[in-house]
């Protein structure tokens, strides 16, 4: 029988929660993790948004669709001929589903191995009894814990004009599961989800139109990277309209009609088979009982926390998408580890200054630290070094020569302030930048290291040399 008294109860088994729970158990704390998510098969499934409807399934589809596109358009130059190339969407979805279920079952095994008590149900905070928090599970059971870590994540934001129905008007969950390639696809929001999932379905043959309310593209990215990305995506026939205001959205069984106003104030109309709404995500605090225990939320509805993820209540912490900061899996996990170590009496590291961002389009986009425009606004004297993949032997051999690496460094100290990449394997290369920044490296440090030849990392080397105007290969 399950004991109902724990050292730590974690609410949510996404990358914030499951990692926190495993680390707590490793540190000798008696830990339970409660999660309410059901996977595509309707059964309890650990791993949260990331594993079930986010990072992992989207990357599986990005890989399949990129292979399809490369086989159709790029492999000819290698001398590889392939006629009648086809895509079996059902098979692609099955592959994605298998990757997801292997991973989610893997978390169940990790819980077992680490003696984390896994509970399926919806958790709510009932109150405090002496030094213990009382937590309800699906309104029937009750458990108690000395500490609580809330990792309830986020959910898709809806358009005011229309509710998602999972079939015609969808969020990320539906957009990962179209059973056929829609002929026409409209996406509201040119953010990370819009670009990644728009790329998937465009590569498979959809005519994709993206409606973005902001006049700016990828405003969190470096301006030069965003400009290059827009140039490439436009060339790929991803049609993006900026400054778009959505009007009415109407549906018939065959199609969705979206009335919208363009940046010149002209009324427009689009008919589409499917509409993906990707306009950001909102913190998940519904049903948690935050009000009833006096848990403070900020103006955006996130749980308010300090740099150590402590809430306003004793022995209650919150991590991941449900708190401030970027909504990223690795940020959630590192916060989970930090809190577990704090609870165990260790010095949890609260510095999340060097969280990498990656957009898994082709070319990939990745950055860490400050953009050039941020440094300019902060009034810091700076210098930059930029180097294109076009001049790199490995990129040429791969036939993937678009984009560049850009390094922003302090003009006086030479310390690296930001690294920005658009190009092949940017998701892997960015870790060089993260490491350099975490060790407070200068651009000279990166310039003086030896890089394997031929490798894409040599572009990072040359970008570091470019900070001091001494590139070799340009
Ligand atoms: P979640 O993963 O959302 O997990 C929260 C869990 O808590 C869920 O299982 C939820 O059902 C459960 N829960 C909520 N309330 C309760 C309750 N009251 N009781 C019990 N359980 C509850 N990030 C990246 O870093 N890289 C990527 O490539 C990436 N790709 C993405 C692609 C898509 C399409 C989407 C939507 C997101 C992507 N993200 C990516 C973001 C990433 O998924 C999130 O940042 C991450 O999942 C946040 O982790 P979390 O643990 O905070 O919350
Ligand atoms: P986002 O914040 O990246 O982009 C939303 C976009 O929608 C913005 O450009 C915004 O200006 C626009 N928008 C907002 N309201 C609108 C409206 N009414 N009409 C038209 N446009 C509107 O959010 P997105 O793409 O939904 O992703 C959510 C989160 O998931 C991201 O913050 C990201 O952190 C995470 N994610 C991370 C990925 C990765 O790391 N590779 C992949 C996918 C998601």
Image: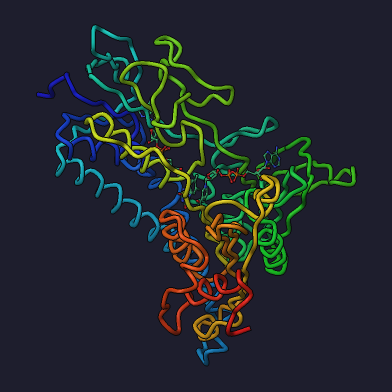
Left or right placement of residue 153 versus residue 120 in this view: right
User: Would you say 392 lies left or right of 210 here?
Assistant: left
Residue 17, horizontal then vertical, whole percent:
33, 36
Its colouring scheme is rainbow
Q: Quadrant of residue 145?
A: top left
Residue 285 in percent (x, y) is at 46, 24
Camera-nearest residue between 191 and 340: 340
Position of residue 228 in the picture relative to residue 42 (left or right): right
Asked whether 151 or 199 is in front, the reply is 151
Q: Residue at x 39, y 58 (%)?
A: 94
Residue 240 shows in the view: yes
Q: Examine the rendered structure and indicate whether residue 85 appears above or below residue 95.
A: below
Quadrant in the picture for the N terminus: top left
Residue furthest out toward the left: 1
Judged from the image, the quadrant occupied by ligand 1 is top left
Residue toward you, 127 or 83: 127
Task: Pick the quarter of the image with the C terminus.
Answer: bottom right
Relative to 42, is 272 above or below?
below
- The residue positioned 77% from the left and 47% from the top of the image is 215
View extreme (top): residue = 130
Report whether 424 appears left or right of 126: right
Q: Residue at x 70, y 32 (%)?
A: 161
The residue depicted at 23 percent of the width and 19 percent of the height is 146
Q: How many marks?
A: 0
Q: Position of residue 184 (x, y in %)?
A: 68, 56
Quarter assignment of residue 344: top left
Residue 296 at what x, y percent from top left?
A: 47, 17
Q: Residue furthest front?
A: 412
Residue 89 seen anywhere in this rendered image of the structure: no
């Amino acid at each position: 029988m399950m004991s109902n008294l724990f050292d730590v109860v974690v609410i949510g088994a996404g990358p914030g929660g499951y990692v926190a729970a495993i680390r707590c158990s490793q540190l000798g704390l008696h830990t339970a993790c409660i999660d309410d998510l059901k996977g595509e098969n309707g059964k309890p499934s650990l791993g949260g948004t990331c594993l079930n409807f986010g990072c992992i399934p989207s990357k599986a589809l990005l890989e399949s669709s990129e292979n399809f596109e490369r086989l159709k358009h790029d492999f000819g130059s290698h001398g590889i001929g392939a006629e009648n190339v086809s895509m079996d969407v059902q098979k692609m979805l099955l592959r994605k589903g298998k990757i997801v279920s292997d991973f989610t079952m893997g978390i169940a095994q990790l819980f077992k191995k680490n003696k984390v008590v896994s509970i399926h149900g919806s958790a709510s905070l009932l109150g405090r009894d002496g030094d213990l928090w009382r937590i309800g599970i699906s309104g029937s059971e009750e458990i108690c814990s000395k500490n609580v870590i809330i990792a309830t994540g986020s959910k898709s934001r809806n358009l005011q004009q229309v509710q998602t129905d999972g079939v015609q008007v969808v969020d990320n969950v539906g957009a990962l599961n179209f059973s056929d390639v829609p002929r026409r696809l409209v996406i509201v929001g040119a953010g990370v989800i819009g670009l990644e999932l728009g790329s998937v379905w465009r590569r498979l043959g959809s005519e994709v139109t993206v409606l973005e309310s902001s006049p700016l593209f990828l405003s969190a990215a470096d301006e030069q990277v965003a400009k290059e990305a827009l140039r490439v995506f436009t060339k790929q026939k991803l049609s993006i309209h900026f400054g778009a205001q959505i009007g009415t959205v109407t549906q018939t069984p065959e199609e969705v009609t979206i009335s919208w106003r363009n940046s010149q104030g002209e009324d427009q109309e689009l008919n589409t088979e499917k509409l993906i709404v990707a306009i950001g995500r909102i913190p998940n605090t519904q049903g948690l009982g935050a009000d009833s225990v006096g848990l403070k939320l900020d103006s955006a509805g996130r749980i308010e926390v300090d740099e150590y993820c402590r809430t306003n209540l004793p022995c209650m912490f919150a991590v991941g998408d449900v708190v401030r900061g970027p909504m990223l899996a690795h940020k959630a996990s590192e916060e989970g580890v930090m809190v577990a170590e704090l609870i165990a009496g260790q010095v949890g590291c609260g510095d999340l200054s060097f969280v990498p961002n990656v957009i898994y389009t082709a070319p990939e986009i990745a950055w860490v630290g400050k953009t050039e425009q941020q440094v300019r606004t902060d009034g810091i004297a700076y210098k930059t070094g930029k180097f294109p993949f076009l001049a790199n032997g490995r990129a040429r051999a791969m036939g993937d020569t678009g984009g560049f690496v850009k390094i922003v460094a302090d003009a006086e100290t030479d310390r690296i302030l930001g690294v920005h990449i658009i190009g092949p394997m940017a998701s892997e290369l960015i870790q060089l930048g993260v490491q350099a920044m975490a060790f407070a490296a200068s651009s000279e440090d990166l310039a003086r290291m030896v890089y394997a030849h031929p490798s894409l990392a040599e572009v990072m080397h040359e970008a570091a040399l470019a900070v001091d105007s001494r590139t070799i290969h340009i």
